[in-house]
Image (cartoon, coloured by chain):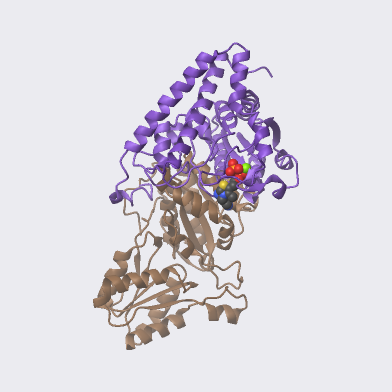
Chain colours: A brown, B purple
Amino acid sequence: MTSSDSQTVAPETPAVESKVMTYLEAISEGLCDEMRRDPDVLLMGNDIGGDFGGAFKVTTGFSEEFGDRRVMNMPMTELGFIGAASGMALFGLRPVVEVQFADFISTGFDSIVQYAATTHYRWQAPVPWVIRAPSDGGIRSGPFHSQNNEAWFVHTPGLKVVAPSTPVDAKGLLLTAIRDDNPVIFFESKPLYRSLRDVVPAGDCAVPLGRARIARPGRDISVITYGATVHQAVAAAVELAAEGIDVEVIDLRSLKPLDTDAVLASVTKTGRALVTHAANRLGGVGAEIAAVIVEEAFEWLDAPVARLGGLDIPVPSSPPLEDAYRPDAGKIAASIRRLVAF
Amino acid sequence: MASQLTNGRRRELHYWMRLTRTLDDRIIKLWQQGRGVGATFNQRGHEAISVGAGAALGPSDVVAPMHRDLGCYLLRGMTPERLLANQLGRATSVTRGRDGNLHGCGDLDLNIIGFISHLPHSLPVTVGAAMSFTYRNEPRVAMTFVGDGSSNTGLFHESLNLAAVHNAPFVLIVENNQYAYSTPLSQQMVIDDIAVRGRAHGVRAEIVDGNDLEAVYEVTYDAVERARSGGGPTMIECKTMRMLGHAIHDGAGYVPPDLLADWAKRDPIDRFEATLLAGGLATQEELDQVADRCRREVAAAVEYAEGSEWPDPATILDGVYAE
Ligand SMILES: Cc1ncc(C[n+]2csc(CCOP(=O)(O)OP(=O)(O)O)c2C)c(N)n1
Ligand SMILES: [Mg+2]
């Protein structure tokens, strides 16, 4: 997948070959490319600098290349340093903030939803920062290192919210998020960091925000999802193909703006829809998507729209409990069978 | 340090204080007459701080004035017309009716950062602005204001610490007006001086009489120039008194009358006018002329704001995002 809009390729970008890399390496490369291209891009966060390179090592080697001036280790003050990022952004810089885990973003909540999100509407000043939020579970990290809190931000006017599911999109959406003139929350999926590899184009492979992709085409039912759950849905689709059920998987990529056209195009083709995500179901992004489908595509539906999400509980630590909490390929397949049999 | 103020500049600053008081008084009248929209803050008692500190900034410096800093907005170039239109929710206002009162009155062309209700969020934002000047090697300084109440927040401490760690070209004016809404200092903190909170973070902190225009100006000017030359952040605690309610709806019956009577003798404008007269820098006639000019300008602003169109609901979705 390559850039489809008019983002310019920096002239100094060397014509290097595409490489196989992990989801995490793709994020790292996106950050590095953008910092080389634009001197106004800088990084802020806990433990991102020096030889340490962040809790997940996304910024390994960055201090060496860009210096502490552009790779700013922050004191443990999310509310304060996200506020400072807004101040830098107001004066033309493009800070990319790493919160150590998406769970800790709540500590900076006011700086995001009250200050940054409202500023352009109120006095027309752009606040172009990105917050990188390592989210999601399945890795036995418990209630405070496993959250998927994207719904808080999708519910906030003035923010954009992105959740890539592949290495290509991780790099491509990050480039676009950094170049966007609005505050963007970039949800990275921790379980994908090192488990997922793909060929990622070198250089500028910006992916536009607000456009979903068809992760797997199919005719019988649409599974609408994002993040790591995309891979669970694709696994379910492979399993169900053997049973003669042809599943289409829509990877939303951006949650705000939401590509409702792509969702509706798929559902009006298949007549059935399952919306699924790892975040808890109640009040989740899936509820909004289900509502849009019912409002806009009611007469195409052959079955009720179903939702499958996490349970309405804090994310438990212990493997059997966490597995019971999360949607997975098996649960997705079971939901699909019910909908197809409806 | 010798005064940086010329006599001409002194007269200018007197004008800005008088304009602030005149506009504030006029706003109170408008609201009493039922011509206001929503809430409006009171300014009385804060004129020397907002004008004195704001005047110490250079042209390319940045400021985030707060809800007691009408004078700072005015002298940094935001007109009474635009400010009043904001208070009245008109299409011609700074926020095009998106925000009200003094909220959101930011304009990057004037190097003014707008504020949100949540206190003290202009503080980390202004520290970030100052850090951006260091990043780009620009000889600029960023300044903002907070109240005594806001100095109790975690964000106050986070921001001062961040400013200290990054040696940011940053100046914080603390407007200690004895109250946070109805809560007196004695129920907010056990320390005598908020300045110690700055020092605790390694930020240089000064204490100044907030009703003395020249004193506020001098100490702020030194802080601004020190910040500009790499000397790092300064916090300045200005001791004053909020002379009216928190906002227009608040009669402030909780403030002991003796306290107000005491501070009334130290009114910042009366005091500065007495200094001007005593030093032969202005005659009573000249002061009266300034008052007349301010009344005329405020009357014109009222006419402009009240005559301005309401925002068109068809535009309601415009501007949520930067395109
Ligand atoms: C986080 C937050 N909580 C509550 C309020 C409501 N509120 C508005 S002004 C104010 C008092 C502020 O006191 P202070 O900081 O001393 O400033 P002053 O109004 O006295 O100038 C309060 C409680 C607010 N604006 N922000
Ligand atoms: Mg106060």
**Who's the residue at 64% across and 24% down the image?**
B218
State ligand 2's quadrant. Answer: top right
Q: Nearer the viewer, residue A162 or B103?
A: B103
Q: Position of residue A335 (x, y in %)?
A: 40, 83
Residue B64, compared with residue B296, is above or below; it is: below
Residue A319 position by quadrant? bottom right
Q: Position of residue B15 (x, y in %)?
A: 51, 22
Of the 4 image quadrants, the one containing the N terminus of chain A is: bottom left
Q: Nearer the viewer, residue B37 or B35?
A: B35
Say whether residue B168 is visible: no
In the picture, measured across the screen, residue B299 lies left or right of residue A325, that is left
Residue A215 position by quadrant? bottom left
In the picture, measured across the screen, residue A305 lies left or right of residue B237, that is left
Of the 4 image quadrants, the one containing the C terminus of chain A is: bottom left
Q: Nearer the viewer, residue B311 or A142?
A: B311
Residue placed furthest toward the top: B280
Say whether residue A34 is visible: yes
Q: Position of residue A173 (x, y in %)?
A: 42, 56
Q: Position of residue A36 (x, y in %)?
A: 48, 44
**Who's the residue at 51% across and 34% down the image?**
B70
Residue A109, compared with residue B89, is above or below; it is: below
